[in-house]
Image (cartoon, grey):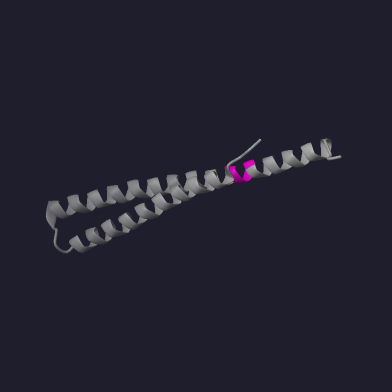
């Protein structure tokens, strides 16, 4: 049995990177929305704030999902590695080198 722990770690890191990029974009959009508060009034201001809120909610949900996927990949990689090591140990004990 062979597992690609490094490949799984790289995949998890990709999800972490994407999540980090999304968090950066979210902060920039929130800062832009906050800077518009004094300028946009009435229905325009309300619509702009509602749009920013919807984006923020969607981005937070995506960030949580990306984090969850990354954690599951990391966990699976560790379990696969442990299973591989355990299997190797069992085979070596069952068939010792002579």
Residue placed most toward the observer, 71 or 98 = 98
Q: Residue at x 13, y 55 (%)?
A: 42
Is residue 90 shown left or right of residue 37? right
Residue placed most toward the observer, 34 or 96 = 96
Is residue 20 shown left or right of residue 84? left
In magenta segment, residue 77: yes
Asked if 1 appears above or below 9 in the picture, the reply is above
Is residue 38 shown left or right of residue 65? left
Stretch in magenta: 76-80
* Picture coordinates of residue 21, whole percent (x, y): 36, 54
Quadrant holding the N terminus:
top right
* Picture coordinates of residue 88, whole percent (x, y): 73, 40
Quadrant holding the C terminus:
top right
Furthest-right residue in this view: 98
* Picture coordinates of residue 78, whole percent (x, y): 62, 46
Asked which quadrant contains residue 29, the reply is bottom left
* Picture coordinates of residue 48, whole percent (x, y): 19, 52
Residue placed most toward the observer, 13 or 38 = 13
Q: Residue at x 28, y 59 (%)?
A: 28
């Amino acid at each position: 049995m062979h597992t690609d722990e490094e490949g799984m770690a790289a995949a998890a890191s990709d999800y972490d990177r994407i999540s980090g990029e999304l968090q950066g974009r979210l902060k920039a959009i929130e800062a832009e929305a906050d800077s518009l508060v004094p300028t946009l009034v009435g229905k325009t201001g309300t619509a702009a704030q509602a749009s920013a809120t919807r984006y923020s909610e969607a981005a937070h949900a995506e960030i949580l999902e990306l984090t969850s996927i990354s954690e599951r990949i990391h966990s699976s990689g560790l379990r696969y590695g442990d299973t591989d090591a355990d299997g190797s140990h069992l085979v070596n004990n069952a068939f010792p080198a002579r």
